[in-house]
Image (spheres, helix red, strand yellow):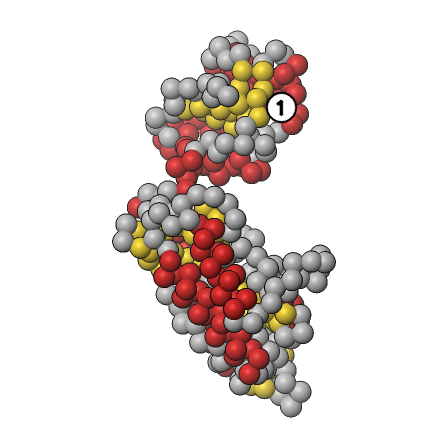
């Protein structure tokens, strides 16, 4: 099939926001439009309020404002759909390509006015998967903030006493998941990072559900999964770090699981280098868990157990982006930044997950920020 040469049209909302930010460096509270023509030129349609900032942030873009598109109207009071249509017509575009998350109402408006809208699943900027040195530095900064917050969280748990019922107490009060999250959030904010999608401090059965944020009192002798994924408030790039700890002695079953998860991560890290198939790393970890006697059950829904999620995901302006470490085809290349987060989950015992963020280098890989992986605290 012949590849489309129609320009790519993006709107800076929802799932497309970070593609636009990647290409232009611009983020704004109100939606704006980016059109990438077949020659690769960037056409930015922004309000008059954002024009000066857009010109400064992305000087290589060709700037358009509503006043340019509707001369003689003062002030211009046109809906976004009308503005985008005027831009498309001004550039002589008979057709545009849009992604699967493009606003449906806007697509229908364009089609109703004679513009062909072609949906594509192709990423608008495939180079997003290969990070520049500046992007790697931004992710590493967020990751270092996550390490500081993780150390603070673990110290908080370590400082707690254990009452006769096994409940953790801190300065005479019950230590809860919420309190530890507050410790984490304060540490992140002090480093210009924010937990935009929350933080996980989950215990027992909660920890057996990988995305359960956790709630309630913390107990001794039970695994506590702490997953910290901050976003840098200045750059927009994310970090991602998980550790599992137990206050006091851990049961033998949890020590065994933690040892297996740690070894699985070491196995995965040893495989990471340019040219390796991403899914091969996931499959190697899944095979390791099976051979170690840790069964995985993926059905029925709500009763999954074992190694039930992908080994890792790309990280950048989105918390989840390419490349992934599961079943997707493709080989790793230098500049990929991704998480490596094996985990085992059993409702009767809880969950154990260990996660680090790495960059693929020409010689192999580099962990962007190190943090202890000790189980008992």
The residue nearer to you, when weighing 60 against 67, is 60
The residue nearer to you, when weighing 122 against 228, is 122
Q: Please tell me how crowded label 1 is: few (under 14), some (14-19), or many (20+) other residues with Cα within 10 Å.
A: some
Q: Position of residue 203 (x, y in %)?
A: 61, 71
The mark tally for this picture is 1
Q: Position of residue 7 (x, y in %)?
A: 47, 20
As drawn, 376 above or below 16: below
Please tell me whether mark 1 sits on a helix, a strand or a loop: helix
The residue nearer to you, when weighing 210 against 271, is 271
Residue drawn at 40 percent across, 45 percent down:
331
Residue drawn at 46 percent across, 31 percent down:
124
Q: Which residue is mark 1?
A: 106
Task: Name the image quarter holding residue 62.
Answer: top left
Task: Name the image quarter holding residue 149.
Answer: bottom left
Position of 57 with respect to 89 (left or right) is left
Residue drawn at 65 percent across, 21 percent down:
108
The residue nearer to you, when weighing 38 against 29, is 38
Task: Name the image quarter holding residue 162.
Answer: bottom right
Q: Position of residue 345 (x, y in %)?
A: 60, 67
As drawn, 340 above or below 22: below
User: Residue reaching furthest front?
Assistant: 291
- Residue 177 at least partly seen: no
User: Residue reaching furthest left?
Assistant: 363
Residue drawn at 38 percent across, 27 percent down:
55
Q: Position of residue 244 (x, y in %)?
A: 51, 71
- Residue 206 at least partly seen: yes
Position of 19 with respect to 204 (left or right) is left
């Amino acid at each position: 099939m012949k590849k489309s040469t129609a320009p790519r049209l993006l709107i800076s909302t929802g799932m497309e926001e970070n593609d636009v930010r990647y290409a232009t460096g611009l983020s704004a509270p109100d939606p704006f439009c980016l059109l990438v023509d077949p020659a690769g030129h960037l056409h930015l349609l922004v309000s008059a309020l954002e024009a000066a900032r857009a010109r400064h942030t992305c000087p290589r873009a060709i700037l358009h404002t509503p006043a340019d598109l509707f001369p003689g109207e003062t002030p211009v009071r046109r809906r976004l759909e009308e503005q985008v249509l005027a831009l498309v017509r001004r550039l002589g575009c008979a057709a545009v390509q849009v992604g699967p998350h493009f606003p449906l109402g806007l697509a229908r408006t364009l089609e109703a006015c004679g513009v062909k809208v072609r949906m594509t699943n192709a990423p608008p900027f495939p180079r997003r998967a290969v990070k520049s040195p500046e992007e790697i530095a931004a992710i590493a900064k967020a990751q270092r903030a996550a390490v500081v917050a993780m150390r603070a969280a673990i110290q908080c748990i370590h400082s707690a006493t254990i009452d006769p019922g096994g409940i953790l107490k801190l300065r005479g009060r019950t230590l809860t998941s919420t309190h530890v999250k507050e410790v984490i959030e304060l540490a992140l904010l002090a480093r210009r990072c924010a937990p935009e999608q929350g933080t996980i401090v989950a215990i027992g059965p909660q920890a057996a559900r990988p995305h359960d944020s956790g709630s309630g009192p913390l107990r001794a002798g039970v695994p506590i999964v702490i997953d910290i994924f901050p976003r840098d408030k200045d750059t927009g790039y994310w970090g991602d770090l998980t550790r599992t700890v137990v206050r006091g002695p851990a049961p033998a079953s949890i020590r065994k699981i933690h040892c297996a998860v740690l070894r699985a991560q070491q196995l995965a890290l040893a495989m990471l280098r340019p040219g390796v198939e991403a899914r091969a790393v996931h499959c190697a970890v899944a095979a390791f868990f099976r051979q170690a006697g840790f069964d995985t059950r993926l059905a029925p829904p709500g009763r999954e157990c074992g190694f039930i999620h992908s080994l890792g995901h790309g990280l950048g302006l989105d918390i989840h982006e390419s490349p992934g470490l599961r079943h997707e085809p493709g080989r790793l290349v230098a500049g990929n930044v991704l998480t490596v987060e094996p985990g085992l989950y059993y409702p009767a015992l809880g969950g154990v997950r260990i996660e680090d963020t790495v960059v693929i280098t020409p010689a192999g890989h580099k962990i962007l920020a190190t943090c202890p992986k000790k189980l008992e605290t």
